[in-house]
Amino acid sequence: MAGAPKDEKKPCAHPSCNCTVEKGKKYCSDYCHDARDTMELSCNCRHPECMAKGVAAGA
């Protein structure tokens, strides 16, 4: 199909997470799913996208 983006990704639904998720998914990990109602300053899903943010912020 012309013009349709392939490998469409969107951000993880956890507010503190920087990961992207594949089409059809809402969270990048079980951690983010389980912590969906928890307010966190940083994400602890341990994926590279979130680990890099923690290092840059001095966490």
Image (tube, rainbow, N blue to C red):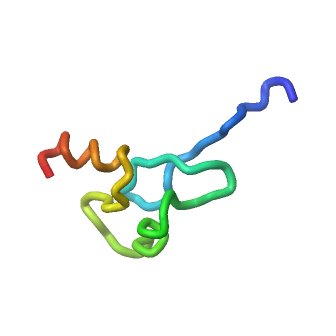
Front residue of 35 and 30: 30
Tell whether 41 sits left or right of 20: left
Q: Position of residue 12 (x, y in %)?
A: 49, 54
Q: Position of residue 59 (x, y in %)?
A: 14, 52
Q: Going by the picture, which residue comes out furthest to the left?
A: 58
Tell whether 9 sits left or right of 34: right
Front residue of 52 and 41: 52
Give the residue displayed 62% in from the left and 58% down from the top: 25
Q: Position of residue 50 (x, y in %)?
A: 33, 49
Q: Quadrant of the N terminus?
A: top right
Q: How many marks?
A: 0
Quadrant for residue 56, please give it. top left
Tell whether 58 sits left or right of 51: left
Q: Is residue 39 above or below residue 9?
A: below
Give the residue displayed 38% in from the left and 51% down from the top: 47
Q: Position of residue 33 (x, y in %)?
A: 49, 70
Q: Is residue 36 above or below residue 57?
A: below
